[in-house]
Amino acid sequence: MSSSSLDDVRPGDVSPDGGARAGRWTVTGYAALHVLLFAPIVVTFVLVVVSSVLVVVWVGILLLAGLLPAMRGLAGLHRSMAGRVLGTPVPAPYLPLTGGPLADLRTRAADPMTWRDLLWMLWAMTFGFAVSLLAVVLFLAVVTLPIWWYGVVPLLRGRAAVDRAILTIGRTERLEQRVEALTASRAVVVDHSATELRRIERDLHDGPQARLAAVSLSLGLADDLFDSDPEAARRLINEARGTSSTALGELRDVVRGIHPPVLADRGLAGAVSALALDMAVPVELALDVPDRLPAPVESAVYFAVAECLANTAKHAGAAQSWVSIRHDGAVLRGEVGDDGRGGADLRGGTGLPGVAARLAAFDGTLSVSSPVGGPTVVTWEVPCASSSPKTTRS
């Protein structure tokens, strides 16, 4: 192991989060890179400010469309260096881009992190640059090498701490975003639950309730005909028996739509395997999940798989499909894909948005990749813990 490697693994070079911090040689290299990036930062900052003034004409809009991504690139590079110096990642909490040049420009311009990036550039051009330049000078000057040896790491960690404070949101802002996300997901889940209740009511009214009413009517007529026409009464009873069997089947379908019995009996792996057996196209399974997970999570993931496989059967025109679900002890990750025609859209219809709403109730996320021509891949993650043994199927 080299001396520089040894320098990076001293006890003091471990952050409170457990990550390895960069040592003096590495941080000196980062300081030199900060100095080299001084000119691009100044030029980018000036151009962004000028373009913002010129946004009243189309030239400013065109310039900002190219400059804002460049500014994010410079900020992202410094986030990476700050994370390495501090021994913990520095996230970039930008708003997600919606697609399209003008839409992305609006999103970037309205993003509070864009203004934080501008504030950081002011810091990086002034005090931040002075700190990094001092570290380089201490290294290059022979008489100050002892000062560099003991002082460069605290110096650059101080700069990295300021970079992190500006380039990412604080704990209070993260909690505010979390509250907003939970409020939005709760509203979606409440709407989805109300829709589900209306669907169940409609299914019961149009199916079993109507058939049970017919059974009651048939039995009443049969009772009236027992003495005068026993044969007709027998026919009515037989019809009532058939109708009651149909109503029982419809009731089972409604119950299965609320919580499938196979899920309660066999767990998530068994229930997904049963779904795959009912598919007309071959389904490759890779299931590595505990025997039992929290029942609400099992139900949400089961219906997510069921919806994705139903879309494959109805719309994809696929020859092959696959389902992968794995649990790492803290997060349940899943994927359903097919080799069909693609074109699935999370923003269209009600199926996939409904699945996303179910998962959001458990702090889960869902994403769809479905270019025209395929393949379609739906992935999700749901935080959940389980102490039961895993069941692996393929």
Image (cartoon, rainbow, N blue to C red):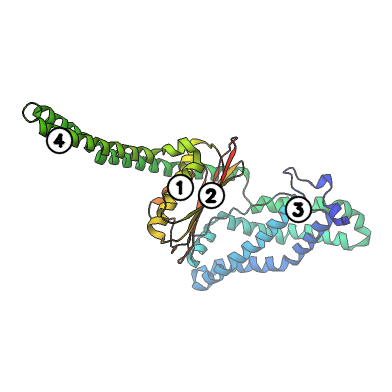
Q: Which residue occupies the foreground of this view, 92 or 351?
A: 351
Horizontal side of 232 relative to 28 (left or right) equals left
Residue 135 appears in the rendering = yes
Secondary structure category for the residue under label 4: helix
Q: Which label sits on residue 334?
A: 2
Q: Which residue is mark 1?
A: 304
Horizontal side of 46 relative to 334 (left or right) equals right
Marks 3 & 1, CB-CB < 8 Å contact: no
Q: Which label sits on residue 132?
A: none
For the residues labelled 4 and 1, the Cα–Cα distance comes to 45 Å
Q: Earlier in the sequence, mark 1 or mark 2?
A: 1
Q: Position of residue 342 (x, y in %)?
A: 45, 62
The amino acid on which the numbered mark 1 sits, given as a three-letter code, is: Ala
Q: Nearer the viewer, mark 4 or mark 2?
A: 4
The amino acid on which the numbered mark 3 sits, given as a three-letter code, is: Val
Determine the residue located farthest toward the bottom in the rendered image: 59
Secondary structure category for the residue under label 2: strand
The amino acid on which the numbered mark 2 sits, given as a three-letter code, is: Gly
Q: Which residue is mark 4?
A: 235
For the residues labelled 3 and 2, the Cα–Cα distance comes to 34 Å
Q: Nearer the viewer, mark 4 or mark 3?
A: 4
Q: Earlier in the sequence, mark 4 or mark 1?
A: 4
Q: Which residue is mark 3?
A: 85
For the residues labelled 4 and 3, the Cα–Cα distance comes to 86 Å
Q: Earlier in the sequence, mark 3 or mark 2?
A: 3
The amino acid on which the numbered mark 4 sits, given as a three-letter code, is: Arg
Indicate the quadrant containing the N terminus: top left, top right, bottom left or bottom right: bottom right
The residue drawn where x is 68% and y is 61% is 77
Q: Residues within 10 Å of mark 1 (few under 14, many from 20)?
A: many
- Quarter-wise, where is residue 41 in the image? bottom right
Q: Is residue 339 placed above or below 388 in the rendered structure?
A: below
Q: Residues within 10 Å of mark 3 (few under 14, many from 20)?
A: many
